[in-house]
Amino acid sequence: MSELLALRPGPAISVIVPCYNERDNVVPMVAALDAALAGLAWEVIFVDDNSPDDTSVTARSISHEDARVRCIRRVGRRGLASAVIEGALSASGALIAVLDGDLQHDETRLPAMFAALEAGADIAVGSRHVGGGSSQGLSSPLRVWLSSEGIKLAQRLTGTSLNDPMSGFFALRRTLFDQLAPRLMGQGFKILLDLVLAAQTPLKLAEVPYQFRPRRAGESKLDALVIFQFAGLLIDKVLHGVLPLRFMGFAAVGGVGILINLLVLLSAQHLGMTFAAAQTLGTVVAMVANFQMNNSLTYRTVRLKGRRYWLGLLLFMLVCGLGGIANIGIARTLHADSITAAAAGTAGALIGVVWNYAMSATLVWRTQ
Ligand code: GDD
Ligand code: MN
């Protein structure tokens, strides 16, 4: 028995399973691990983001019968990558394995992955795209296309040689995870890519083929938003983290807001409103639309609801109103100082968006 898998009173292997609405998959998952890891000392940590289907209640009730089963229930937060990080940070085993909670990843490949680690790999990656692997379980031709294009893009932008860089199925030593953890972004779906990119020296990666199974119960959570976040993650890497991801989302929403503002302005004028009235209407509509978009996209994980939604909207309009005044004031002053109108306008707008972002982040969504 090797050092990594040595039998001690505590677990040698910690399996991290992120879950959201996977109630019906929890029991089969534990049974599958029990079979695949027979003879090894393991624990499984389900990390559930307070699923409405009460996944955590099911997981907890198994843990009463089986001490190898644990559950972290996170309240007020969402996200696959951050769930995996939190689970892994709470692990006690020397080895960490990450596995989806819907049985799409083939747990019988885990021993082969541990063997790869013992043979010297830093991360053993379950791969659908090396000999013997397959991604048949992808639910639609669109998913197949998105997956293969995403892989190519990720390989090009990040310089990784992984054939399946989007895999959510992998294993590594806990010491390595602990070392990389402070540099992880923890946003979105792609925790493996996040880990690989966080390493300052290239990691030794071993790919272990597996066949991606169809989902057993429940439904996939990958949607347009996840793809939007993934794009943000790649851009962030290209820019070496100079701009915070949230800032980019905020600026993108701002761009859409300008279009909305213009559209309302022109239509209202067309309907006979004065310029001043039409522009006021355009600004207000754009602000409300921006608030709504930021709340459901940029700040999705800390989304405001109920009374806090309306208070947030009020505060947002106040903050952006001030930002608008600052924008105009700065542009005027610069322009009076014989700077061209275009340059003065751009400077004003840039300062305006930075102000709006900083104030929204600290006051409205309070993330900083
Ligand atoms: N805690 C938590 N919070 N878990 C989540 C969240 C979340 O916000 N979103 C998804 N999960 C869990 C799901 O419950 C599931 O166990 C796992 O993460 C993967 O989510 P799916 O919705 O089943 O993903 P998929 O099948 O579309 O994506 C698979 O393929 C990707 C590559 O194309 C997964 O294997 C991904 O890990 C992989 O990157
Ligand atoms: Mn899945």
Image (tube, rainbow, N blue to C red):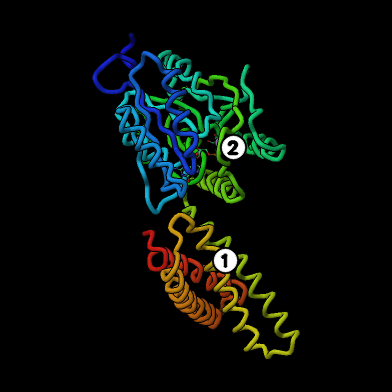
Amino acid type assigned to the residue bearing label 1 in the image:
Gly
Amino acid type assigned to the residue bearing label 2 in the image:
Ala
Residue found 56% across the figure and 63% down from its top: 293
Name the residue that disc number 1 marks: 254
Q: Residues within 10 Å of mark 2 (few under 14, many from 20)?
A: many
Quadrant of the rendered image containing residue 70: top left
Q: Residues within 10 Å of mark 1 (few under 14, many from 20)?
A: many
Residue 15, how many percent across, how many down?
Answer: 40, 28
Above or below for 99 versus 281: above
Label 2 element class:
helix
Q: How many marks?
A: 2
Residue 140, how many percent across, how many down?
Answer: 69, 38
Seen from the viewer's position, the closer of residues 338 and 87 is 87
Q: Residue furthest right?
A: 270
Q: Which mark is residue 154?
A: 2
Residue 175: in sight, yes or no? no
